[in-house]
Amino acid sequence: MMPRLFQGIRAAAGRRRAMPGGRLSRLAAGGLLGALLGAALLAPLPPGALAADEHSHETPRPPHAGLSFQRMFGSFDRAAAQRGLQVYREVCSNCHSLRLLSYRNLRQIGLSDAEVRAVAAAVQVQDGPNDEGAMFERPGRPSDRFRSPFPNEQAARAANNGALPPDLSLIVKAREDGANYVHALLTGYADPPAGVTLQQGMNYNTFFPGHQIAMAPPLTAAGQVQFPNMPDASVDQMARDVTTFLAWAAEPELEARRAMGVRIVIFLCILAGLAYAVKRKVWADAH
Amino acid sequence: MAGGLTQSEFKNPVVRWIDSRLPVFTMMQKEYGTFPTPRNFNYFWNFGALAMVNLVIMIVSGITLAMHYTPNSALAFDSVERIMRDVNFGWLIRYIHANGASMFFIVVYIHIYRGLYYGSYKAPRELLWMIGVVIFLLMMATAFMGYVLPWGQMSFWGATVITNLFSALPIVGDPIVTWLWGGFSVDNPTLNRFFSLHYLLPFVIFGVVFLHVAALHITGSNNPLGIDPKGPQDTLPFHPYYTAKDSFGMAIYLIVFACLVFFAPNYLGHPDNYIPANPLVTPPHIVPEWYFLPFYAILRSVPDKLGGVVLMFGAIAIWFVLPWLDTSPVRSMRFRPWTRPFFFLMILSFLVLLYVGGKPPEGAYVTAGRLATAYYFLYFLVLLPWLGVKERTLPLPESISRPVLRGGGPLPAGAAAKPMEKA
């Protein structure tokens, strides 16, 4: 029984080695060796409990996208975010809402007031009731939330083969390894490997958990979205840009947060130095 | 004590007027000014003060958040996002509160394990220790209910899993769960009462912390040598010595806190909690916040539901009787060469449980969790009582001041520092 046990531990440690928690798992394995002292109390194991390595077809880790804001002190590339907005408006927004954002927020990624007004006015939103008690349509204003493509969940499902396109306002924060995952997903469509049968209306994606995703490949050809000054942008370029835009949408405070953090940590380091000097001085006569 | 004013030593007439009628200034001077404190504290003794500061930070940031939060299952998630996006510095307040909870548990775990290592739970500090365990339980309840409030997927499913634990109790289990929920599933009434209690409990904690500090000031603090101060040569007035030392510790604590808040605010959170709660979709792995993972791992180590619940609560309940489980008259592990390695192994088992609790309950993780659980209880229920009787402890120093002033015996880290020139 003992060799089997160690095998299981080693398998578990090996499986996680690529992860940042690899050191922890070695620690855990080390702890186990010690804790074997308590092995007499070990409860009987269910059969197959040690067959740890059966998930060989797990979803791979998304590669690092290397985007501007992913560095510790990085910020959002304004041009990329604006191109990403264009991708969202022309492609994603046909199915995906962005309900937590208002058009006025777009000033943050460098749009002028006039541009924001133009983006908002491009959609018709429902307002009302008016003095006669009727709802009416009007062009959007900067203060409006982004218009959702479907009025409710049922309408969204009915138009999408039963699947619900998730809201994208928080998608980068709401997924493990957010920005890398979104970028990998958008570029991860492929033909299913031999032996994999897709369910009807599903698509094969390398990075989607379970590999079967209802969303058809949204970005398929270079130049699908025509950026000014950048004709024939590659699929990867479009994916990177829309990921930057969505990362900003999820964490619009990121730049302000990091800028404040730098100042506060510098201040605290000086404070700590002074506090230590005071402590040394106060304690000088106590030793 | 009948009638008349208190003799106040303060010169300022206003202070003196108040102090002679309500001697709060005299009390503060006695308890935080001249209060005799062992001179040999190491930096582990900062964590009590840090926990106090952390509690205040949590209450202040929490009250501010409550001004903007809406405790309704249809509105809660969006109201949190409004705080993040539209309330001035709302993101800062919320990240301080969310990461403050993690910092609170880091600080309190270190505080607890410091007490375990240096025997701070032994006579005459048993009640002080037990009050501390009560604070820890209240903290866990408060943190759990606070995590439910954003009404994300982990909020909802965490609440479902944890409240369902009580259904393991025979006969009364199911009625208790229904009563906790305020219905037949986690829903709006659950959110409402959790919000109400999450607002209440911190003030209860504040009250119990007051008792904790009051009891501390009766017995006085323990110290790294675990021996009692024998006279004024063994102690220093709390102010300025320990106010200065705590200030430095607090600056370091704030640096760590700031790095979390400003550069990795979601590192300790779970991405699923940025998905609005959906009773129809269960997340693939339901994991509680990291500070509950050791106990969650114990729960999952037992194949039987009731057994798991009993063992999980037992892991904390055992701390209540710890003063009587540890039979050794020597407090500090420094002088307990036999017990010391087993103590470190116990810390390791706790860390293993912390790690395993966040992993899916399968394969080697289950085995690791069971071994660590077994050792955790073995340490408290068998090793401590037995070693305390059998162990040959090292000779204790004569007094606190001797090893500090004349060398000999293990020196506290700070004691070796060269004295600075006096200005």
Image (tube, rainbow, N blue to C red):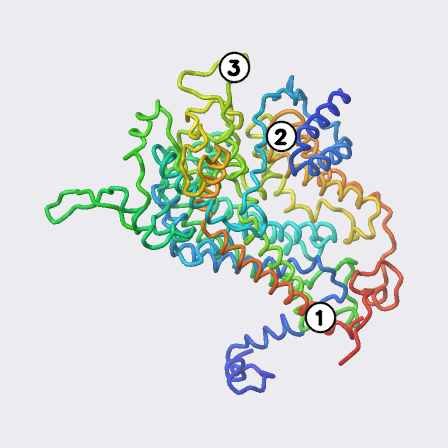
What residue does disc 3 label? A196
How many C-alpha atoms fall within 10 Å of the one at disc 3: few (<14), some, or many (≥20)?
few
Q: Is residue B365 above or below residue B32?
A: above
For residue A47, what is the image quadrant? top right
Determine if marks 1 and 2 fall on one subunit.
Answer: no
> What SS does tag 2 mark?
helix
User: Which quadrant is the N terminus of chain A positioned in?
Assistant: top right
Determine if marks 1 and 3 fall on one subunit.
Answer: yes
Q: Disc 3 and disc 2: Cα gap in Å?
A: 36 Å
Between B148 and B189, the one lying in front of the other is B148
Q: Amino acid at mark 2?
A: Ser
* Residue at (61, 25) in percent of width and height: B362
Q: Disc 1 and disc 2: Cα gap in Å?
A: 49 Å
Q: Position of residue A141 (x, y in %)?
A: 27, 50
Q: Amino acid at mark 1?
A: Ala
Asked if residue B79 lies left or right of residue B50, the reply is left
What residue does disc 1 label? A277
What residue does disc 2 label? B301
Asked if residue A76 lies left or right of residue A91, the reply is right
Mark nearer the viewer, 3 or 2: 3
Determine if marks 3 and 2 fall on one subunit.
Answer: no
